[in-house]
Amino acid sequence: EKVVNGDAEWRRTILDPRGESFIGSAWNPYHTEEEQCNDGASLCLKENGTYSCAPPSVQLTGRWEELDINGDGVWRRSEAKMAQNALQCKYSVNVVEVFDVFIKFLKSRDKIIWLHPDIENGRAIHKAYFSYAVGDIIMCGYRNTDMCANLLKRGIFDAPLKYGTAPRVGQTIDSALEYCYALLEDGGVCDRTLPSTYTVWKKGSMEQCKSPNYDKYVFRNPANGKTKSMLVVSYDAVQAYHRAGSLNLFVVFKTIIIGIYLLAMLGEGKAIFSIVALLRVFPKFPSEDEDEEKTEELFCYATFQGTTKRIYYEECSYEEFLSIVRESFDIPGQQELHISSSDKVLWDPAPNDLVVVEKGEPPEEGIEGITDVHRYTMVVLTIIRLFMLFILCWVGCMFLLKDTDYIDLLLNALGLIVVVEITENVYMYLLSSELREEVEDIGQMTVQTQGTSTSKNPAKWDLLILLAFILTTVGIIIFNHYMIVAPLTDSLECACLSSGPRCAEAHRFSNEFWDRYWTQDVPASLKKMDQLKATALFEHLSPDFDADMAVVLGQQLAAPSPDLPKIDPDIDVRDAPVVEGPEAHEQREHQHSARAKRLLLSDRRESRPHHRRHHQKQQLAAEEG
């Protein structure tokens, strides 16, 4: 139980049995067909043919449509609370905590980007800010600083290094590593900011990935060609299952070892089958009354096809005696028999000769029958032995199939063989030598199996058993490979290295994703932030100001175009002459726009605390008004 359930529990910590893999139904006793919530006990979850092994917080970064319920481009705290139960059941994470994580990440970048008042107050996150922050959250899914060299090798930072589109990454190898280290180091930004589920995932993945292994790698900066030597990491668990999952010498070796073990089980099974045949057809030992009655009758010993029996008969004719013999040996009536009689035993009769010994004792002392008590006792012991054979086959195969090392596989097989030979060891070492000699002096108990197909053509049955044995051994290896080894190999590679052909994160956050993120998504997010900034300032300056004009101003600030209306930032509203009449509203609108643009430009040069105090004063004045 410890071996089977322990191995199933270990697999469950890596891959959720409620996924699509057969690993959950056939080899896992914890599997159930009922819909259940994700309890977060497994590192990976299989969905749509791929394995998702990222921490729950990272999984939500690619699911904006599940967060923005009303689809207005703003993720509000009220929406997070509304979807809290459903998303926690699906991803095993409190979505309100994830909302706060994004708020914290954005506030930590307040020296680089302008923060919307909704973010300052923790009320809502616009999609532009969400898109800007997902890069940092996704980076947390790489677990520790050992992976930073692997990320450089994969080219994740090539775009910012080459084009300089991400100030937080910089354009040097050292600045990119510093950005990565600051996020992933112990006690770093990820550990301090992400919810407790991230820490659980991080420790669990490090435990299952086992010890790290390092290889030297030289990275070349795509911008200036400078190089830096570093160490890329892999893990023992990933390498071990790559070895076990590849069709190489190890798989052949495992097939041979398991075949030898199953061969020993087959020998044990044939021995049990012989005992079952004995219990089915071996004669009953007569009782004392029956024995006294039969001693008054005539009897002889007859041998037919190697089987010797005592034949009781009365004074009768030759034909009647022949009928008694045929009935005793269950010989068909149409089969001709040659009966020879002698005062001594004929040791070498023809195959179908019936030898009748009229006088004397049988050739050697043997067991002629067994009592009912003896028979029932043997039935109970045979059932126990058959149950032990089944347990040894199941547990032994599970024990050997989970091995991923040559030495462990060989030693475990030797240990199981010793367990299989326990019956011989009990007979050899627990019985006294005198009792063993007495048992060994008794003649063999011959069991007649006439009428069965195995007795008619034993060579054919031996060949069929050999073919069945080979097919069973190969079938077990193939089944184990596709249903257990292959899913675990893909899951461990995804969980430990965020790579692999069937890793959802490797496809979702590929090099193309990161190139697009650094060169397009980040600049577009910054541009959208400028538009939101203009809109927020105009709302403070003129409540009746058209919001469309705010967007136009934001676009002009982000990327000035000759097609947009020009606003002179040097015009001060307080210095402009007051215009009366129909043109007064249009002039005030233009003055507010100029003032807003001047504030926007000056805000880029001013410190953030001063800007916050300015907005706090405006907000306080608006509330008092």
Image (spheres, helix red, strand yellow):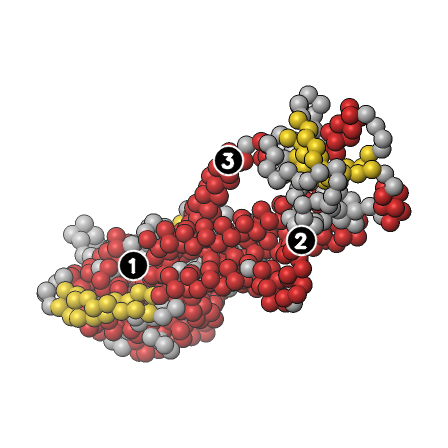
Q: Is residue 102 something one can see in this rendering?
A: no
Q: Distance between the residues labelled 1 and 3?
A: 79 Å
Q: Is residue 449 left or right of residue 460?
A: right
Q: Residue 64, image x and y in percent? A: 41, 54
Say the numbered circle drawn on residue 442.
Answer: 2
Query: Which callout, 2 or 1, points to the residue nearer the camera?
Result: 2
Disc 2 crowd rating (10 Å Cα; few below 14, some 14-19, many 20+) is few
How would you rate the neighbour count of disc 1 (Cα within 10 Å): few for under 14, some for 14-19, many for 20 or more?
many
For label 3, the residue is 459
Q: Which amino acid does label 1 sit on?
A: Ser
Q: CB of mark 1 within 8 Å of CB of mark 3? A: no
- The numbered mark, 2 or 1, whose residue comes first in the sequence reads 2
Disc 1 versus disc 3: nearer the observer: 3
The reply, left or right, for residue 450 in relation to residue 236 is right
The mark tally for this picture is: 3
Q: Mark 1 points at which residue?
A: 525
Q: Which amino acid does label 2 sit on?
A: Ile
Dividing the image into 4 quarters, which one contains the C terminus?
bottom left
Residue 581 occupies quadrant: bottom left
